[in-house]
Image (cartoon, helix red, strand yellow):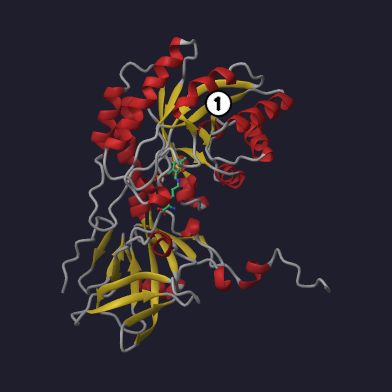
C-alpha cells in the first residue's frame, strides 16, 4: 500500500482504513448525502485564514478574500466572521458578500469590465475601493459617481509586466495580458484621474497571476509598484493603500508553496517607508486545500488500450483538469491492499476532455468512493450545468457535524428561468 502522504490534520484514515474528514467518515457522508459532492473542512478554512492573518498582523494588512475562488454563502459568512474583507469581480459577488453579512467597507472591486449598473450597485453599497483597469472605466466611474452625487474611491490596477511563471491562462501581470494599466501609462492616468469629478484616489493595485509558487515575481512586482508610489507622492498624489492582489500557490502535487511568514516579512521590509495600508486578495491559499470533491465509481471499464474509472462527478463539476491540465490528487476513500493499475478517471459528460485525472496508479473498482483533493478553490465556483447536470451538494464538516451548505440542485431549479410554456 502507498503511504498516505496527502494526509493532513483534517484528513486522516481511521483504523478501518477509511478516510475521515475531521470527525466525519467520508463513506457515511456519501451514504447520507449522495455523490458527487463537495466537502469542506471548517477547521482547514479557519487554520488557513489564521495563518494568513497572523503572518500579516504585524503589517496591519486588510485581507480581502477573493470571492471567485469559492463564493458559497456559508463560507463567505464564516470568513466575514473571521474578519475578512472581500475582493469581488461582479455585482453577483457583491450581492453574495452582502447576503452573507460581509462588510461593504472592506470590499474591493476588481475586474476589467465593470458595467454601469455594477458600479452603481457598489457605490450605493459603499465599498472600500474600485480597482480601475482602464481610461474608459475611469471615465465611466467618474460619470456615474457624479450623477449619484457620491465620491468613488479609486485605485488603479497597474500591470507591472512581470512573469509569474504559472499556467499561461492564469498569468495576468504580463504586458500582453488584458488586465490592468500599462506601467508606463499609470502616472499620466493618475494625473488625469485627479482632474475628474466624483473620484477620490485612494490606492494602487496589482495582481500578477495565480498559483504562483515563488516569491520573486511578487517582490519584483512590489518593487516596481513602489517606484511608482514614490513618483506619485512626488507629484502630490499620496496613497492610502497598496493592494498586492492574490496569487499565492498551494500544494496540489509536488509544489513547494511560498511560506506565508517569509512572504509577509519580505513585503514588510519593502513597505517600511510606505505610510498606507497593505491590502491582499488571496483566494486559493485560503480555500484550495480546505475542500475535496467526493465521487463514486459508476463503472470500471477496460478497453484494449486503457482502464477507465467512470465516476459520477465530471468536468462540469470540476473543470480544472480539463481546462488547465491541472493535477488533483485522487485517493480511494477506503484503502485496500490491491494491485494498482494505470487508470484514467473520467466523468459521464459527452466530451473526450471530460477527464479528472489521467494515467494514475489506482486500485479501484465499481462503487468505490474517490476523494479528489485540493478542490476547495475554483472547483464549485467554476462549475456549470453542462449536459443538464445539476450542481452538486456542498457540505461543511465541523468536528463530527455535517452542515449542508448547498443542497443538490433539482432538475426543476436547473430550468426554472426558462419558458417551457412558450408556444413558438
Ligand atoms: N485578485 C484578482 C484581481 C484576481 O483576478 C484573482 C484571481 C485573485 C485575486 C485571487 O487569486 P488567487 O489568490 O486565488 O490565486 N481558475 C483558475 C484561477 C483563476 C484566478 C483568477 N483570478 C484556477 O482554477 O487555477
Label 1 within 8 A of ligand 1 by Cβ: no
In the displayed structure, would residue 252 be above or below residue 311? above
Left or right, 394 with reference to 344 = right
Which corner quadrant of the image does residue 273 belong to?
A: top left
In the displayed structure, would residue 376 be above or below residue 111? below
User: Where does residue 400 sit, x and y in percent of width and height?
Assistant: 35, 61
- Nearer to us in this view, 327 or 383: 327
Which corner quadrant of the image does residue 254 belong to?
A: bottom left
User: Where does residue 204 sit, x and y in percent of width and height?
Assistant: 46, 26
Give the residue at mark 1.
Answer: 154
- Nearer to us in this view, 310 or 59: 310
Q: How crowded is mark 1: few (under 14 residues within 10 Å), some or many (20 or more)?
A: many
The answer, for residue 389, to whether it is visible in the render is: no
Residue positioned 23% across, 67% down in the render: 13
Left or right, 201 with reference to 246 = right
- Nearer to us in this view, 292 or 12: 292
> Quadrant location of the C terminus?
bottom right
Residue positioned 38% across, 29% down in the render: 61
Label 1 SS? strand
Residue positioned 50% across, 42% down in the render: 178
Q: Residue furthest bottom?
A: 304
Amino acid at each position: 500500500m502507498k503511504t498516505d502522504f496527502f494526509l493532513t490534520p483534517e484528513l486522516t484514515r481511521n483504523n478501518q482504513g477509511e478516510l475521515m474528514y475531521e470527525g466525519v467518515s467520508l463513506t457515511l457522508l456519501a451514504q447520507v448525502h449522495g455523490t458527487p459532492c463537495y466537502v469542506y473542512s471548517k477547521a482547514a478554512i479557519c487554520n488557513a485564514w489564521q495563518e494568513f492573518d497572523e503572518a500579516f498582523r504585524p503589517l496591519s494588512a486588510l485581507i480581502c478574500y477573493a470571492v471567485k475562488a469559492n463564493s458559497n454563502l456559508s463560507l463567505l459568512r464564516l470568513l466575514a466572521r473571521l474578519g475578512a474583507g472581500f475582493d469581488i469581480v461582479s455585482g453577483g459577488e457583491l450581492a453574495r458578500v452582502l447576503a452573507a453579512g460581509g462588510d461593504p467597507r472592506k470590499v474591493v472591486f476588481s475586474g476589467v469590465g465593470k458595467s454601469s449598473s455594477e458600479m452603481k450597485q457598489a457605490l450605493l453599497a459603499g465599498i472600500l475601493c474600485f480597482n480601475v483597469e482602464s481610461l474608459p472605466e475611469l471615465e465611466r466611474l467618474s460619470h456615474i459617481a457624479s450623477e449619484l452625487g457620491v465620491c468613488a474611491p479609486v485605485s488603479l490596477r497597474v500591470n507591472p509586466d512581470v512573469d509569474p511563471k504559472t499556467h499561461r491562462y492564469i498569468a495576468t501581470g504580463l504586458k500582453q495580458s488584458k488586465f490592468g494599466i500599462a506601467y508606463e501609462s499609470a502616472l499620466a492616468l493618475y494625473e488625469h484621474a485627479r482632474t475628474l469629478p466624483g473620484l477620490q484616489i485612494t490606492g494602487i493595485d496589482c495582481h500578477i497571476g495565480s498559483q504562483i509558487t515563488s516569491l520573486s515575481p511578487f517582490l519584483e512586482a512590489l518593487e516596481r509598484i513602489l517606484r511608482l508610489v514614490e513618483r506619485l507622492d512626488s507629484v502630490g498624489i499620496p496613497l492610502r493603500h497598496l493592494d498586492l492582489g492574490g496569487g499565492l500557490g498551494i500544494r496540489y502535487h509536488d509544489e513547494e508553496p511560498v511560506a506565508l511568514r517569509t512572504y509577509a516579512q519580505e513585503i514588510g521590509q519593502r513597505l517600511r517607508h510606505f505610510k498606507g495600508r497593505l491590502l491582499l486578495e488571496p483566494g486559493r491559499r485560503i480555500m484550495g486545500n480546505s475542500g475535496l470533491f467526493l465521487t463514486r465509481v459508476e463503472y470500471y471499464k477496460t478497453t484494449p488500450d486503457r482502464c477507465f474509472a467512470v465516476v459520477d462527478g465530471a468536468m462540469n463539476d470540476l473543470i480544472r483538469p480539463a481546462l488547465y491540465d491541472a493535477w488533483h490528487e485522487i485517493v480511494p476513500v477506503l484503502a485496500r491492499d490491491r494491485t494498482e493499475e494505470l487508470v484514467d478517471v473520467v466523468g459521464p459528460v459527452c466530451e473526450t476532455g471530460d477527464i479528472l485525472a489521467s494515467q494514475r496508479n489506482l486500485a479501484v473498482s465499481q462503487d468505490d468512493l474517490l476523494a479528489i483533493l485540493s478542490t476547495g478553490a475554483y472547483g464549485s465556483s467554476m462549475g456549470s450545468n453542462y449536459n443538464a447536470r445539476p450542481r452538486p451538494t456542498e457540505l461543511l464538516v465541523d468536528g463530527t457535524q455535517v452542515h449542508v451548505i448547498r443542497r443538490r440542485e433539482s432538475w426543476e431549479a436547473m430550468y426554472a428561468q426558462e419558458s417551457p410554456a412558450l408556444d413558438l
